[in-house]
Image (cartoon, rainbow, N blue to C red):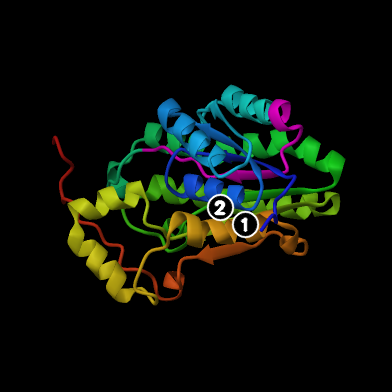
Amino acid sequence: MDRLKGRSALITGAGSGIGRGVARRFAREGARVMIAEWNDDAGRAAAEEVRELGVEADFVHCDVGDRTDIEGAVRATIDRFGVVDVLVNNAWSGAPMARFEWRTTEEMEAAFRVGTLGVFWAMQACFPGMKDQRWGRIINLCSLNGVNAHMYTVHYNMAKEAVRALSRTAAREWARHGVLVNILCPAAMTEASKAVFEKQPEMLEAVEATHPMGRLGDPEEDIGSAALFLASEDCRYVTGNTLFVDGGSHINGAAWAPEMPEEKPGR
């Protein structure tokens, strides 16, 4: 307990899913938490949920595809808690699944702006304070989709793999300042994944059948606990790493093969 006592964390996309799970896990270890979320209702609800765990928490509206919003979220966290000790870049918003050849330039640009530039802006905004105190933790959520080249999500795969390169570069440059940058590639049962599996239940059966542990992770207990390690003093000699928090599914690849029509809908 109290592994993050006295620390403050800014978590993007923490209104639901993995972000919310990480926020709750950090709170259980004493962290003060700023929920950065574009969905105001979800963000406020998550902040209230975290406060009920006995720590300070607040909500700030944030569209990670908007640099002004990102920088505003960092300022709001500093105004509220004094510093951003831990930054968790988790938020994502993008186009639905589609074949590579159907993707538009607009979809790819939007994915890069939200999924990669948003992370870049947040890291830049948090770095000065972390450098000044010679302590900081940055955790960037990436994906097995990019690592394993999952089908029909090229926009997402591209954005997340770019974040891995971004993270490793920052890790090299910032390690001397005590600012550690690591990557989490999770596999969790979230609202988003449930929506996919509800439409294609046979795919969930295939994923679970080939998964070494036979299940997808819990956002709070499984993914949040790994994030806690990377946010804590336990991580003092770890930077530039990609941690696969997936129950071993990266070893043999999960059976992620959603159905997709041959012809583009509407043609």
Query: According to the image, label 1 marks what residue?
Result: 228
Q: Which residue sits at x=36%, y=59%? A: 150
Q: Which residue sits at x=18%, y=42%? A: 264
Location of residue 141 in the rendering, given as x and y in whole percent from the top left corner: 54, 51
Which secondary structure, mark 1?
A: helix
Q: Which residue sits at x=70%, y=33%? A: 125
Q: Quadrant of residue 60?
A: top right
**Left or right for 77, reference 114:** right
Name the residue type under label 2: Arg
Q: Can residue 212 be seen? A: yes
Quadrant of the image containing the C terminus: top left
Location of residue 44 in the rendering, given as x and y in whole percent from the top left corner: 48, 30
**Left or right for 95, reference 30:** left
Instruction: Look at the image and say whether residue 140 sits in the magenta stretch.
Output: no
Instruction: Look at the image and say whether residue 93 sits in the magenta stretch.
Output: yes
Marks 2 and 1, Cα distance to the nearest angstrom? 7 Å
Look at the image and give the residue range highlighted in magenta: 78-94
Name the residue type under label 1: Leu
